[in-house]
Image (tube, rainbow, N blue to C red):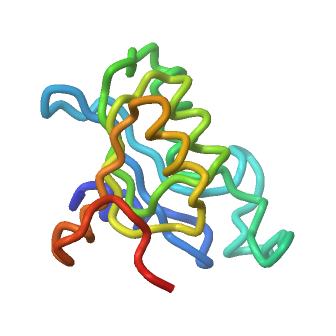
Amino acid sequence: MNIARQVATRSTCDRKHVGAVIVRDKTILSTGYNGSIRGLPHCDDVGHDLEGGHCVATIHAEANAILQAAKNGVMIEGAEMYTTASPCWSCFKLIANAGIRTIFYGEFYRDQKSLEVARRLGIELVDLAAATRGGDCQPPPD
């Protein structure tokens, strides 16, 4: 998770810095952080494109990690992902279809649906913060 946190420092959206690392057998396969579409200005520089209070100008860290693996011809099926925040529904769908079997996350990020569907698909979600709270993979209480 320390590497995912370091990757998050590269984020170009100051609303939330997120980093993701895809790993197999203790080997890093790909990394990603949330940032603008390649070739477009960073929202930190030109402002945020907000919808419903969330910046939609960025590609999320999890999606960028999957895209970087694909771009570089790296197979990630059966791998694990470490991400500083639990995946949103859109990223979870990409993770599931990429064949990633375990997602370790550092904090819960607003999307209960991903947690529910992961159980049905047999994708393991591990809340690393819960381990220090003595809990399981449930979001923290409101």
Question: Does residue 10 appear to the left or right of 52 in the view shown?
Answer: left
Residue 35, horizontal then vertical, whole percent = 61, 57
Residue at 41% over, 77% down: 140
Question: Does residue 66 appear to the left or right of 83 in the view shown?
Answer: right
Residue 51, picture quadrant: bottom right
Residue 31, picture quadrant: top left
Count of labels shown?
0
Residue at 51% over, 34% down: 95
Question: Does residue 104 appear to the left or right of 17 in the view shown?
Answer: left
Residue 20, horizontal then vertical, whole percent = 40, 50
Q: Is residue 107 above or below residue 89?
A: below
**Quarter occupied by the N terminus:** bottom left
Residue pushed farthest bottom? 142
Residue 117, horizontal then vertical, whole percent = 55, 41
- In this view, the residue in front, 87 or 8, is 87
- In this view, the residue in front, 12 or 99, is 99
- In this view, the residue in front, 11 or 90, is 90
Residue at 59% over, 33% down: 94
- In this view, the residue in front, 63 or 106, is 106
